[in-house]
Amino acid sequence: MQRHARLGATALGLMASFYLVGCGDTSPSAGDAGASDGGATVPADGALPERFNTPMTPAFGSMTNDPRAILVTVSGEAAATEGFAYSATPAEGDLVFVDGWQVNMTRVLTVIGNVRLNRLGNMPSDPSVVGAAVAADPRSFAVNLTRPGPIEGAGGEGSAWPLVAFRNGVNGLTLDPAQRYAFSYDVIAATAAAENVNLDADDVALYRTMITRGWSVYAEGTATYRGQAPEATSAFASFPTTVRWQVAYGAPAAYLNCNNPDNGAEGAPGVQPSANGAYRAQITFHLEHWFWGALQVEDPPLHFDPFAARAAVTGAQGEVTLDALQGVVPSNLQDRMMRPLGDRGGQTRGYTVRNPAALSFDTGGVSSVRDLRDFVAFSGRANAHLNGEGLCFVRPMGELRF
């Protein structure tokens, strides 16, 4: 898939600062007044009400076009449905694993809650500040991002699922097409109080596990090595060439006052209704974050070798979960035989290998990241956006849970 740059250089600089403030805030917070806590207390066994077995009635359809309405959707973009193809000579803007892997998603479950609109804040120095509440939906929504949705994705990228339709504000307030409103939402731990957006029976069974473990994300897929064959004496020769992978963790957070690429070159915050038809606001997940090689920066190179290096192997097949990454020091990556993990990303155009004998990930000075398991979850916590590239202020609402 391709990640298009939609903002100018000035905007990117501002957005980077916006993003870093959110990602650097690692301490749990009570959050803004609208932050949700994931709903009602649920049984320890993950029991679900009967209604959860049936997906909810969509809030709107692909042809809905009510004037002044703000229609909220969710998408994992084409990455969720098509994965990441490998190319040694990727086109500019293509997202590719520099170490030779093709990565596909078979299931990505997450939970969104408390979608809300506020007046814009009056403190440009603090992008987390928003004004008075305008509209909110207190419900939470369980969604599988790998299922193609009925709505076209933002910018024509992938597809999306309908979540919420805001047609009026608090006390019947009419949404004003002359105003932009701050757009915020939460990603929360799985809860039995959630609405089932599109989960099937297999998804529901895994969702019960998410409830009992306190997870906000469950993802799985398959990675296939497509790069150059390693030398027989190389440590890479012992790596599996097909790996079933799983990423599952709890990282509840509020995503506040999101910037919006629709607001011109600067991508200023907020969504603006139209008197001529509905406006769509898409909560967008960038699933490549789990495979980034650095924290506190945007779009670092993608690597799958650190996962493959820790996989349990049967023949050419491997399986790996986040537990296998526990104890692995990001700045001193090692394989399952405790050998230094080399960097074979030089086979991909546009990537420069610094040290072929030792691949090192950069934690960006985040002291709470103890190992590679933390690294993946911390990076994943910053993967939620607005309308594709719009960055939000990220305020953690609890510790990472595995």
Image (cartoon, rainbow, N blue to C red):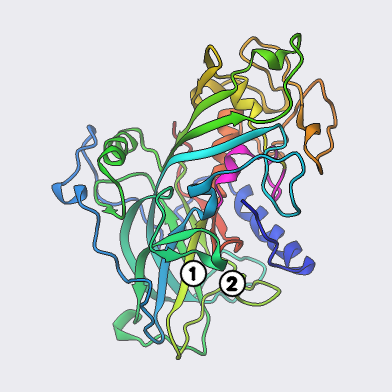
Residue at image coords 16%, 51%: 51
Circles 1, 2 touching at the beta carbon (< 8 Å): yes
Prevailing SS of the magenta stretch: loop
Residue 17 sits in which quadrant?
A: bottom right
Quadrant placement of the C terminus: top left
Q: Nearer the viewer, residue 278 or 257?
A: 278
Residue 133 sits in which quadrant?
A: bottom left
Residue 183: give its label.
1
Mark 2 secondary-structure assignment: loop
Label 1 environment density (alpha carbons within 10 Å; few <14, some 14–19, many ≥20): many
Residue 361 sits in which quadrant?
A: top right
Amino acid under label 1? Phe
Instruction: Say above or below: 349 vs 17.
Output: above
State left or right for residue 44 relative to residue 241: left
- How many marks overall? 2
Cα separation, mark 1 vs mark 2, equals 8 Å
Please give the residue where the numbered disc 2 appears in the rendered image: 269
Amino acid under label 2? Pro
- Position in image of residue 350 (x %, y %): 81, 44
Q: Which is more N-terminal, label 2 or label 1?
A: 1
- Position in image of residue 20 (x %, y %): 67, 53
Q: Nearer the viewer, residue 122 or 310?
A: 310
Which range is magenta? 285-300
- Position in image of residue 268 (x %, y %): 63, 73
